[in-house]
Amino acid sequence: MKYLIAVSLLLLLLISGCSKEELFSEQSRHDLWLIHEDAKLPIVVEGNTLSKVFVILLHGGPGGSAQEFNASGKPFTDELEEDYAMVYYDQRNAGLSIGEWEEEKLTIEQHVEDLEKVIDLLRHHYSDDIQIFLTGHSWGGYLGSAFLLDTERQLKVKAWINIDGQIHRNRNILDILERIESIGAEQISNSVNATAWEAILDEVDLEKAKSITQYDVDAENNVFALIRAAERQIDRDGVLEYRASSVTPSIYSDNYDPFRIVITNTGDRDISLRRQMYSFDAVMDTDLGNINLPSLSIYGYFDVNTPLHQGEYFIDKIGTLENDKALVILDKSGHSSMLNEPVALANEMKIWIEKYR
């Protein structure tokens, strides 16, 4: 009841100055807030609302910010905003969200519930006939996949686009070691900075020699160090299409850490979410087959943070018909394909959206 009252009051304020018709144009910019369960989540809708196609873009982290896409990835977002209404919202304990972050509210289940309320708010604010397409990057790929495990929630979405998403936490750690090894061997074979890659592969061998089959939040820290070393070397090798600008190096460049909470929403609570992801692996193994929605997975060839194996795992496990699921690899991208190959990524998304709108 508290949620309904809060959102109703909020919607009255938002809609009072305009009719439903005025919400739809080829160039819109609307700011909304979702107030739910001690959180105030900012939502920016930007682009072609006249299309009535709304693409929710889930940010990474946990702890990133949706507006990072607009700030440092405009060649990507501008391409999509020409044709669709892009929806950027900051998740709880992330970006510009506001609230009291009690640990019991920082759960995978709560993030899933928040996302469902965002969809409900969009339909209430605009109209019931808008088409919702869901997409997410990195942790956003994980969150979107977790959201879709329930068949009733799938009915609220036309299709799903997973961009470099980590789907299974423990498998991902093991996949990282394999992918660094594979890329390193390929670069050595091509005589590209062979000495540097040999040193990295020696560290990978030491990690693999521990024979860890089940990682946890403590054991994974050394793997994060290997990720950073490999990403720095990939950058030096010059194999990526486009290098991240210096404006956001801590998020998109060499020292990217996908589980760091931003300064304004910081604390050790992200460790709790990381632990939950390991526990949630069993749910993913069991329930991914429930997903029968059209699903596209897009991964960077040089992504050592969430390797393309995660996309293969997702596509293999879901119950979607073969003709309605696909895996696309971007050959000159790392973990942030919206910066490495922004137009190519946007075009792949457009093809998928147009197929199912």
Image (cartoon, rainbow, N blue to C red):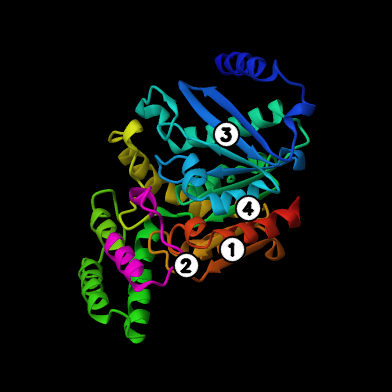
Q: Secondary structure at mark 4?
A: helix
Say whether marks 3 and 1 touch (CB < 8 Å): no
Which residues, given as a range, are shown in magenta?
228-252
* Residue that badge 4 annotates: 79
The reply to whether discs 1 and 2 touch (Cβ–Cβ < 8 Å) is yes
Q: Is residue 242 within the magenta segment?
A: yes
User: Is 339 covered by the magenta stretch?
Assistant: no
Q: Nearer the viewer, residue 75 or 232?
A: 75
Q: Which residue is mark 3?
A: 44
Q: CA distance from mark 4 to mark 2?
A: 17 Å
Q: CA distance from mark 1 to mark 2?
A: 11 Å
Q: Amino acid at mark 1?
A: Ala
Disc 3 marks a residue whose amino acid type is Val
The Cα atoms of the two marked residues, 3 and 2, are separated by 29 Å
Check disc 1 and report its element: helix, strand or loop: helix
Residue type of the residue flagged with mark 2: Glu
Sooner in the amino-acid sequence: mark 3 or mark 2:
3
Crowding at dot 4, Cα within 10 Å, few <14 / some 14-19 / many 20+, comes out as some
Mark earlier in primary sequence (1, 4): 4
Measured from the top left, where is residue 198 in percent x and y?
24, 78
Instruction: Say whether marks 3 and 4 touch (CB < 8 Å).
Output: no
Q: CA distance from mark 1 to mark 4?
A: 10 Å
Tell me the mark number nearer the camera, choosing from 1 and 4. 4
Residue 241 locus on image (x, y percent):
47, 67
Instruction: Name the quadrant of the N terminus.
Output: top right
* Residue linked to disc 1: 344
> Crowding at label 1, few (<14), some or many (≥20) Cα neighbours within 10 Å?
some
Q: Secondary structure at mark 3?
A: strand
Mark-to-mark CA distance, 3 and 1: 24 Å
